[in-house]
Image (cartoon, grey):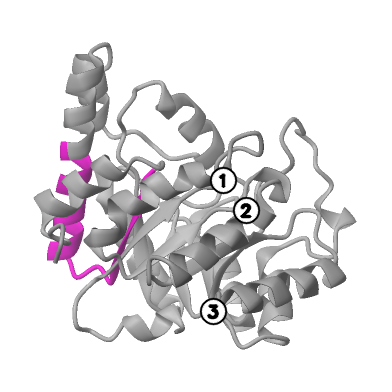
């Protein structure tokens, strides 16, 4: 089933993101996470790919298990990094064999440990090129990434929205946003995207801050801003782990409730492989009740 068909106006599409364990960890470790979110019945579960495609085989295997064992819809992340056209073809064949009908096509992060990766060295330098290639060869549902505060390498938001239009024109059917902590950025971006002619569904990425030490790397990688209310939470609770966890979950819940009140089409929860956090957020926001 192509995920885009879920955006039918019956209510927000609710999804969770998980990531494969590190290569040195048994793949079975991820199934504890899936066991913990299964009865939340998310509309789909996305599985990340790892920097440089380091966990690509695990991504497809996890998606296979999500579909066959958990009876949930899976979306595999797929990146440009290090890909040849033959490699993409082989990966698409493996996904087809695993029953994967949906991909999130991304440029991706450079291989770990590199700071000056040459994107022109691969077959695909940009996500729109990968999207167009996949769309021309497989009947897959294709999602693309969007950035409410602009991509860190874009000069401004208008330039970034121009690139997103290119992804949609190449074959992306819906968009998943990068995390953000201030909903005003999302609403501003959504309005500008609509004015630019982007009419495909958009699901908003929400990341619960459970540990103040996470934020430095998040800001560096994603370029997101920390609004004053979140900064005050971190200042007050950052040194007390349990209080920070509760406050971070509460902040994410308030973001979600506000988004729902403003007719967001989807909520995409970055779970960080913490099923109990997902369960608390789903329950407190009314997204899903465990067992329903």
Q: Are marks 3 and 2 in contact (CB under 8 Å)?
A: no
Please report whichever mark, 2 or 1, sits nearer to the chain's N-terminal start: 1
Residue 292 in magenta stretch: no
Between 76 and 181, the one nearer to me in the picture: 76
Give, as a single range, the part of the protein colored magenta. 250-271
Identify the residue at the far right of this view. Answer: 121
Q: Seen in the image, is 229 located left or right of residue 48? A: left
Q: Is residue 154 above or below residue 208?
A: below
**Disc nearest the viewer among 2 and 1:** 1
Quadrant hosting residue 51: top right
For the question of whether residue 161 can be seen, the reply is no
How far is the residue under mark 3 from the one under mark 2? 17 Å
Residue at position x 38%, y 53% in the image: 34
Q: Quadrant of the C terminus?
A: bottom left
| Tag of residue 101 | 3
| Tag of residue 58 | 2
Q: Are marks 2 and 1 in contact (CB under 8 Å)?
A: yes
How far is the residue under mark 2 from the one under mark 1? 7 Å
Report helix, strand or loop for mark 2.
helix
Between 231 and 217, the one nearer to me in the picture: 217
Q: Which residue position is annotated with label 1?
A: 27
Question: Picture coordinates of residue 253 (x, y %)?
Answer: 17, 46
Between 117 and 191, the one nearer to me in the picture: 117
Residue at position x 38%, y 72% in the image: 71
Question: Picture coordinates of residue 132 (x, y %)?
Answer: 69, 79
């Amino acid at each position: 089933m192509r995920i885009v068909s879920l955006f039918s106006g019956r209510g927000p599409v609710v999804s969770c993101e998980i990531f494969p364990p590190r290569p040195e960890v048994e793949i079975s470790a991820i199934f504890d996470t899936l066991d913990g979110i299964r009865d939340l019945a998310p509309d789909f579960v996305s599985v990340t790919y790892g920097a440089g495609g380091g966990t690509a085989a695990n991504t497809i295997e996890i998606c296979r298990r999500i579909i066959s064992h958990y009876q949930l819809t899976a979306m595999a992340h797929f990146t440009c990094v290090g890909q040849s056209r033959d490699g993409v073809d082989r990966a698409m064949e493996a996904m087809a064999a695993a029953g994967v009908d949906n991909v999130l096509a991304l440029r991706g992060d450079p291989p770990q440990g590199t700071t000056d990766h040459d994107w022109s060295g691969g077959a695909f330098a940009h996500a729109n090129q990968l999207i167009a290639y996949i769309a021309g060869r497989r009947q897959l549902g294709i999602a693309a990434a969007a950035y409410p505060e602009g991509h860190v390498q874009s000069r401004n938001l208008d330039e970034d929205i121009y690139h997103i239009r290119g992804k949609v024109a190449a074959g992306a059917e819906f968009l998943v946003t990068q995390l953000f902590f201030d909903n005003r950025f999302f609403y501003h971006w959504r309005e500008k995207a609509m004015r630019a002619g982007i009419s495909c569904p958009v699901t908003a990425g929400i990341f619960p801050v459970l540990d103040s030490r996470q934020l430095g790397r998040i800001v560096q990688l994603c370029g997101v801003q920390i609004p004053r209310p979140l900064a005050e939470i971190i200042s007050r609770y950052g040194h007390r782990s349990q209080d920070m966890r509760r406050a971070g979950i509460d902040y994410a819940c308030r973001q979600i409730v506000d988004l729902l009140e403003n007719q967001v089409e989807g909520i995409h929860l970055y779970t960080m492989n913490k099923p109990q956090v997902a369960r608390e957020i789903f329950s407190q926001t009314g997204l899903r009740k465990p067992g329903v």
